[in-house]
Image: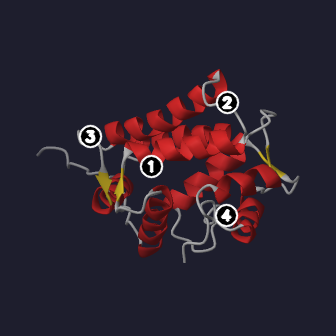
Amino acid sequence: MGSPTTTQPKSPRSVFSETQKRKVHHLFNVLDIDRNGQLQPNDFVNVGKKIVAQLKLNEKSRNARLILLKSHRLFVQLLADLHNPELSLTLWDWIAFFRDQIESGDDSTLQHYIHRTSRHIFDLFDMNRDKMISREEYANMLTIYNISQRTAYQGFEELDTNHDNYITSDEMINGLSNFFLSSDTDAKGNLIFGEWR
């Protein structure tokens, strides 16, 4: 008689919760600067232009061109992550990407997206390049996305988990991870892109 076969129990499948869907939908609306129902290169480039204007940089300066390049690159990388050959993303494409990543059981692509996006956000928000984001830097940047100062301050408080009045790169990554991965409506980082509820 052969030896009995043993099967490893399957890990429970992750579920893309209604809370996660609402947060991702909200972020799509925040990023859709021209409000045409699609994420396109101009949405990202126009944010870069607003940042350049807010920082009062010469549009032809190296720093300004770098901001515009990073903004465009973030969109191109997003298309690559979604395996989307088009130059636009619909809300359905956007939500399906996050749902599929969360429910796949392998969140490596999503983790890579979170870390890359966190670095990009941190670089843009850290206007004085001191490797920390102050409350003012955070609020000023979110005004570009039409998020009120009051809501920005709430988001800042959630991200500043050690309460030193600055956001570090690690705090940004943790907050962004909570935003995408947590189904807890009170998770620290849920307000990183403003009020979604």
Check contact, mark 3 vs mark 4: CB within 8 A: no
Q: Is residue 110 visible?
A: no
Circle number at residue 58: 2
With respect to residue 38, does 197 lie above or below? below
Packing grade of label 1 (10 A; few <14, some 14-19, many >=20) is many
117 and 111: which is toward the camera: 117
Check contact, mark 4 vs mark 1: CB within 8 A: no
Q: Where in the figure is residue 87, as x and y percent of width and height?
A: 29, 42
| Secondary-structure class at tag 3 | loop
For mark 4, what is the residue? 188
Q: Is residue 47 visible?
A: yes
Query: As drawn, is 72 to the left or to the right of 87?
Result: right
Packing grade of label 4 (10 A; few <14, some 14-19, many >=20) is many
Q: Residue at x 38, y 62 (%)?
A: 14
Q: Residue at x 68, y 68 (%)?
A: 148
* Spatial separation of the CA atoms under disc 2 and disc 4: 36 Å
- Nearer the observer, disc 1 or disc 3? 1
| Secondary-structure class at tag 4 | loop
Q: Where in the figure is residue 115, as x and y percent of width and height?
A: 55, 40
Q: Residue at x 64, y 55 (%)?
A: 175
* Spatial separation of the CA atoms under disc 1 and disc 3: 19 Å
Circle number at residue 83: 3
Q: Where in the figure is residue 73, as x and y percent of width and height?
A: 45, 33
- Nearer the observer, disc 4 or disc 1? 1
143 and 121: which is toward the camera: 143
Q: Where is residue 126, by image quadrant? A: top right
Mark found first going from the N terminus, 2 or 4:
2
Check contact, mark 1 vs mark 3: CB within 8 A: no
